Image: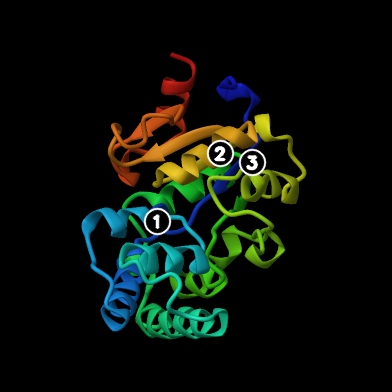
Amino acid sequence: MAKFSDIKGFVFDLDGVITDTSVFHSQAWHQVADKVGAPWSKELEDGLKGISRMDSLEMILKAGNLQDKYTDDQKVDLATEKNTNYLKLVDQMTPANILPGIKDFLDEIKDGGYLLSLASASKNAPKVLQKLNLTDYFPKIVDPKTLTHGKPDPEIYIKGAELIDLEPEQCIGVEDAAAGVESINAAGETSIGIGDKTILKDADVNFADTAEMTLKNIEAQMDA
């Protein structure tokens, strides 16, 4: 792990970090699972966090032993249907959906001269940021369409650092999912995990929730 004084930028995940769109994703995926007849469980729901759309669909189909029942085109149709349902929910979002403390933390980062980028597997990230009035904070967003591998592969966080012209060791990655923390660590960045410490045990820095995240609290854990 780097020293706090070495840090020049932050690379953020979106879902579960800036806003809780994960609940919308869960609702939309649950609808797909019901449609295909796959069993829905808390374990499956948690496993979909931070995973790309097609990989998420494969996990749902696998849960029902249905992965060979659908053609590639049918799978695309199912994923598209999920996204349509998800976007209907996103359309109802406002800045009130920003997670506690995040707006203040983004202001603190900006005022401190740190650079920011977004590393979300969601193709809808720009739309979500727009609904939250946070677009100006993230002029650099990794385009998921340019990625070859999904999380936990480090590619998305490596690109997040490249977008702001920094080396990985100069960046902190912020995640709420184990696959995301693994991605950050593999990229060579310092990882912040938000949520259950037992699940995010590999994170360099842990916070129970977003309200605890400040530069001072991060520095205290990094330089302890």
Q: Quadrant of residue 20?
A: bottom left
- Helix, strand or loop under label 1: loop
* Whole-number angstrom distance, CA of label 2 to CA of label 3: 22 Å
Crowdedness near tag 3: few (<14), some (14–19) or many (≥20) residues, C-alpha within 10 Å: few
Which numbered disc, 2 or 3, marks the residue that appears first in the sequence?
3
Say which of 2 and 27 sits in front: 27
Tell me: residue 69, above or below residue 187.
Answer: below
Q: Looking at the picture, which amino acid does disc 2 mark? A: Ile
Crowdedness near tag 1: few (<14), some (14–19) or many (≥20) residues, C-alpha within 10 Å: many
Q: Looking at this rendering, what residue extends furthest in the front direction?
A: 68
The x, y position of residue 106, in whole percent, is 49, 50
- Helix, strand or loop under label 2: helix
Residue drawn at 49 percent across, 63 percent down: 55
Q: Looking at the picture, which amino acid does disc 3 mark? A: Gly
* Whole-number angstrom distance, CA of label 2 to CA of label 1: 15 Å
Residue drawn at 46 percent across, 80 percent down: 70
Residue drawn at 46 percent across, 75 percent down: 131
Side of 73 where 60 appears, left or right: left
Q: Are marks 1 and 3 in contact (CB under 8 Å)?
A: no
The x, y position of residue 117, in whole percent, is 62, 52
Residue 65: mark in rendering: none
Q: Are marks 2 and 1 in contact (CB under 8 Å)?
A: no
Name the residue beneath numbered marker 2.
184
Name the residue beneath numbered marker 3.
113
Name the residue beneath numbered marker 1.
49
Crowdedness near tag 2: few (<14), some (14–19) or many (≥20) residues, C-alpha within 10 Å: many
Tell me: residue 224, above or below residue 124.
Answer: above
Say which of 26 and 57 sits in front: 57
